[in-house]
Amino acid sequence: MRCTVVLGAAVLLGTLPAAAQTPADPLAARTKGRADAPVVVYEMADFQCPACRQFALETMPAIEREYVRSGKVRFVFINFPLSVFDSTFHRNAGPAAELAMCAARQDRFWPAHDALFQRQPTWAPLADPAPYFAALADTIGLDRRALAACLADDAIREAIAADAARAYRSGARSTPTFWIERGKIDGAIPLPAFRAVLDSIYTARTAPR
């Protein structure tokens, strides 16, 4: 299962950024796991995508429990709102990403990530999600004044657009897309299949040389 939109090709070539290594790295707040984990997983996702929600609610908890907390995997979230490429598609994905990125400035990205996916059926169809997002921000403990200043900062939208461009340049054309040690997975594949991929790569990366 995945969300797909026809994307234009007006994006320059490039690659995904390296996984966060220091608190100063802009990816640090969107990263889970040890900096020296043998396997790094990049998820390119759209907060309004039902397939991304499926992964977040059904698969990610097990991945975190079995691989991230054990030190096997470092997990990095990359914004890929498809509305960046087609403004008529997933219109609330951009504002949702802005909320999450502003939450990251308050070290609350993952609570925002979880809340957005849990409540996606409520906010996704809204003509104006801003009032709902403001209430959601309160439930995850965001400072209102800091949030308002952040949402008014064009740098947040530029960072999201840069994320989306990197995802596109890496080969992503739908959400969710995963890059795991130079291998690409398209869509929210079942947990057993995801486990098989991670186990195989982990074994290869940690085998005696």
Image (spheres, rainbow, N blue to C red):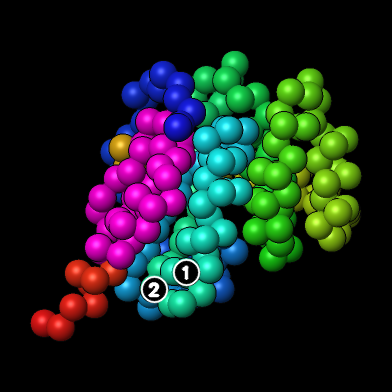
Relative height, residue 171 to residue 9 (above, below):
below
The image's mark for residue 74 is: none
Q: Residue at x 56, y 26 (%)?
A: 83
> Viewed as shown, does residue 22 lie left or right of 184?
right
Which quarter of the rendering shows the C terminus?
bottom left
Residue found at x 75% / y 44% = 151
What is the distance, in whole Å, between disc 2 and disc 1 at their CAs? 8 Å
70 versus 183 height, above or below: below
Circle 1 crowding by C-alpha within 10 Å: few under 14, some 14–19, many from 20: some
Q: Position of residue 202 (x, y in %)?
A: 28, 69
The picture quadrant where one finds residue 120 is top right
- Residue 119, can we see it? yes
> Is 135 displayed left or right of 123 in the figure?
right
Of 91 and 49, the residue lying toward us: 49
**Which of these two is toward me, 154 or 190?**
190
Foreground pick, 112 / 194 = 194
Q: Quick check: is 190 in the magenta stretch?
A: yes
Residue 29 on the magenta segment: no
User: What secondary structure is found at the residue carrying circle 2?
Assistant: loop
Give the amino acid at mark 2: Lys
Going from N to C along the chain, the mark reached first, 2 or 1, is 1
Task: Provide the residue designation for mark 1.
Answer: 66
Residue at 38% across, 47% down: 178
Is residue 84 in view? no
Q: Residue furthest top?
A: 88
Residues marked 2 and 1 touching at CB (< 8 Å): yes
| Residue that extends furthest to the bottom in the rendered view of this protein | 208
Q: Label 1 amino acid?
A: Glu
According to the image, label 2 marks what residue?
Answer: 72
> Residue shown at 52%/65% (left/top)?
64
- The magenta stretch is 172-201
Element under label 1? helix
